[in-house]
Amino acid sequence: MLAINSDMEEKSGQYELLIKQMRCMMESEKDEIALMANASSLLSEVFPWHWIGFYRVIDNQLVLGPFQGPVACTRIAFNKGVCGTTWARKETIVVPDVEQFPGHIACSSLSRSEIVVPIFDKNGEVKSILDIDSTELDAFDATDQHYLEAFCALFSDNRPA
Ligand code: SME
């Protein structure tokens, strides 16, 4: 029990530091692509996930943005796969086992679980998403969801000032 608590605390601490570093980067740089590129790098330095990257809504499709990991699909339609479904539902989706998610898009056969977090424009519409895949089953818990939503809120336009 103690070990579980200290693991959780360690993970929370890592996320809190990541969020601070991201905030610092955002003070000196406003270009979204540059920030997404460094965001995916920052996350990949701390967490050994298989794929970490952004898709942006462009002309009513999700188009691949900055990422770390193997080559990925470049375009995803609304309501397709985990990413397109996150866009449609406007909420984070955690998938403990990708084989159990109907319509999952298998960019890499090594992906076993994933989390996708939406990023909102000033009207509350999804303007991009953060997609993270793991080679482990059930890799993402409530702590990951909480902090990854806080991390993505930094990229949202409707975040409180
Ligand atoms: N997992 C996604 C596809 C994108 S890749 O995994 C990078 C999905 O089903 O939406």
Image (tube, rainbow, N blue to C red):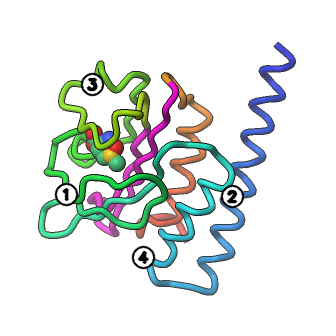
Which residue is under mark 3? 101
Q: Residues within 10 Å of mark 1 (few under 14, many from 20)?
A: some
Q: CA distance from mark 4 to mark 2?
A: 18 Å
**Type of the residue with mark 4:** Ile
Observer-nearest residue: 152 or 97? 97
Which residue is under mark 1? 75
Q: CA distance from mark 3 to mark 4?
A: 29 Å
Q: CA distance from mark 1 to mark 2?
A: 28 Å
Which residue is under mark 2? 18
* Ligand 1 within 8 angstroms of badge 3 C-beta: yes
Q: Residue at x 46, y 53 (%)?
A: 69
- First along the sequence among labels 3 and 4: 4
Q: Residues within 10 Å of mark 4 (few under 14, many from 20)?
A: few
Observer-nearest residue: 148 or 98? 98
**Type of the residue with mark 1:** Arg
Q: Residue at x 63, y 82 (%)?
A: 27
Whether label 1 touches label 3, CB < 8 Å? no
**Type of the residue with mark 3:** Phe
Residue 132 among magenta residues: yes
* Quarter assignment of residue 144: top right
